[in-house]
């Protein structure tokens, strides 16, 4: 049987593959320390579980409206409006099967065949593949900066790029664009007329005194061609519940909902009621405790990695990743280095090549203090052995 060339030419997710390999080795009895996770290692909030049980017992097990139950869409609109100081309604919201699904819907709705879409570099592994599946052309900034700059946007727009994806706090770097950087970026997007998808899935995992700056804070009018994507996965440790959403102009959400009608239909009904509970404020204590734990783990990991001469990194202000550059010759092939770390030293990390950044490694501090300490020790041992 011949399969679609569009699908055959797409790359599998390196993060999911390596995580699966680490689990296989653990199942076989190997002592594996995993600093590869892209998800919180905390249980989902009690309120989410209780709301799910209540929904099941109450018979809320049938189809819902394609873009989500009205109550959830309304609270997503209200929460996002408060956060950004703008006014969105339920009609601006499409709830989907995770933020990844929201991103795919938005891109399929916006991208014409051959359209260029500017991506962060390094990028989250699925951005380029999603753009290609939508018929578009991924474009990477030439500045070499770890954050998209205003100059990158202007240069890309001058060559015909139609849209841009932003991600701050970002995966894999954990970096947060500062106020001046974000203001300039907003001005460039406004001037060039490109549309924007702001992937804000890590918006609540920020270790600054205030929230992460956002382009809509400086140019509210950009809401007319900006889609904001978020979900419950990272903020509330609800990755498996698969609830994310897009908040966008109604013209865009209508198209995204139309795509969803013909692919998945509505997201899981039970998970929607669980998400409604946490967004209503019933899980704030757990959310705040998780954030405090991540802050402490970030500080611990950075202190430990600073003692490894082969690494150079910027301390992240968000998410739960550190993205060090490998100064040793071993970093020339990050995939080979990651496999060596896993096979010889029992340490699972993600190669920078998966994010378009050869010579880097992504380490997750969504792990226990014991695993962070042991992981850093194994990483150092690998470099010491390699340079001996």
Image: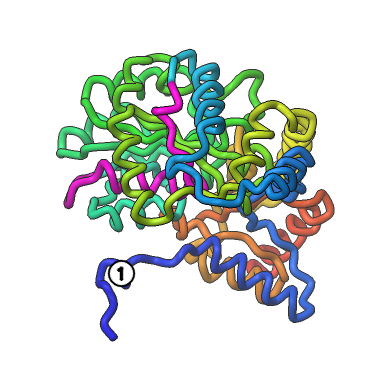
Q: Nearer the viewer, residue 177 or 61?
A: 61
Q: Which residues are magenta?
A: 89-116
Residue 384 horizontal/vertical position (percent)? 70, 64
Residue 366 colored in magenta in the image = no
Q: Residue furthest right?
A: 370
Under circle 1, the secondary element is loop
In this view, 242 is above or below 6: above
Q: Is residue 62 left or right of residue 257?
A: right
Q: Is residue 40 left or right of residue 116?
A: right
Q: Residue furthest front?
A: 59
Q: Residue furthest bottom?
A: 1
In this view, 364 is above or below 91: below
Residue 58 visible? The answer is yes
Residue at numbered disc 1 = 9
Quarter of the view holding residue 110: top left
Residue 279 horizontal/vertical position (percent)? 64, 30
Q: Is residue 218 left or right of residue 317?
A: left
Residue 307 visible? The answer is no
Q: Nearer the viewer, residue 262 or 199?
A: 262
Residue 111 colored in magenta in the image = yes
Quarter of the view holding residue 48: top right
Residue 50 horizontal/vertical position (percent)? 77, 42
Q: Residue at x 32, y 49 (%)?
A: 259
């Amino acid at each position: 049987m011949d399969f679609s060339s569009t699908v055959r030419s797409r790359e599998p997710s390196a993060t999911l593959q390596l995580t699966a390999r680490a689990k296989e080795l653990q199942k076989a009895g190997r002592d594996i320390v995993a600093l590869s996770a892209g998800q919180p290692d905390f249980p989902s909030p009690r309120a989410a579980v209780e709301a799910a049980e209540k929904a099941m017992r109450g018979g809320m097990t049938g189809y819902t409206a394609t873009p989500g139950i009205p109550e959830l869409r309304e609270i997503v609109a209200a929460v996002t409006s408060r956060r950004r100081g703008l006014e969105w309604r339920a009609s601006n919201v499409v709830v989907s099967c995770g933020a990844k699904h929201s991103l795919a819907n938005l891109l399929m709705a916006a991208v014409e065949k051959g359209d260029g879409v500017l991506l962060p570099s390094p990028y989250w592994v699925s951005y380029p593949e999603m753009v290609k599946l939508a018929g578009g052309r991924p474009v990477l900034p030439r500045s070499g900066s770890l954050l998209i700059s205003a100059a990158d946007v202007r240069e890309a727009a001058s060559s015909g790029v139609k849209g841009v994806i932003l991600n701050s706090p970002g995966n894999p770097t954990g970096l947060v664009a500062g106020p001046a950087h974000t203001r300039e970026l907003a001005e460039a997007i406004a001037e060039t007329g490109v549309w924007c998808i702001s992937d804000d899935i890590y918006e609540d995992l920020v270790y600054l005194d205030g929230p992460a700056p956002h382009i809509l804070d400086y140019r509210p009018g950009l809401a007319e061609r900006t889609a904001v994507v978020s979900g419950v996965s990272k903020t509330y440790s609800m990755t498996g519940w698969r609830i994310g959403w897009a908040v966008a102009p109604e013209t865009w959400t209508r198209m995204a909902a139309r795509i969803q009608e013909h692919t998945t239909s509505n997201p899981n009904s039970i998970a929607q009621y669980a998400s409604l509970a946490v967004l209503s404020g019933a899980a704030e204590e757990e959310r705040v405790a998780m954030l405090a734990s991540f802050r402490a783990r970030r500080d611990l990991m950075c202190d430990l990695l600073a003692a490894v001469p082969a690494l150079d990194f910027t301390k992240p202000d968000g998410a739960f990743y550190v993205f060090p550059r490998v100064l040793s010759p071993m970093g020339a092939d990050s995939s080979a280095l990651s496999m060596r770390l896993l096979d010889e030293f029992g340490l699972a990390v993600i190669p920078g090549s998966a994010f378009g950044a050869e010579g880097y490694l992504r380490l997750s501090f969504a792990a226990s203090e014991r695993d962070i300490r042991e992981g850093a020790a194994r990483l150092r041992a690998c470099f010491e052995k390699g340079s001996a």
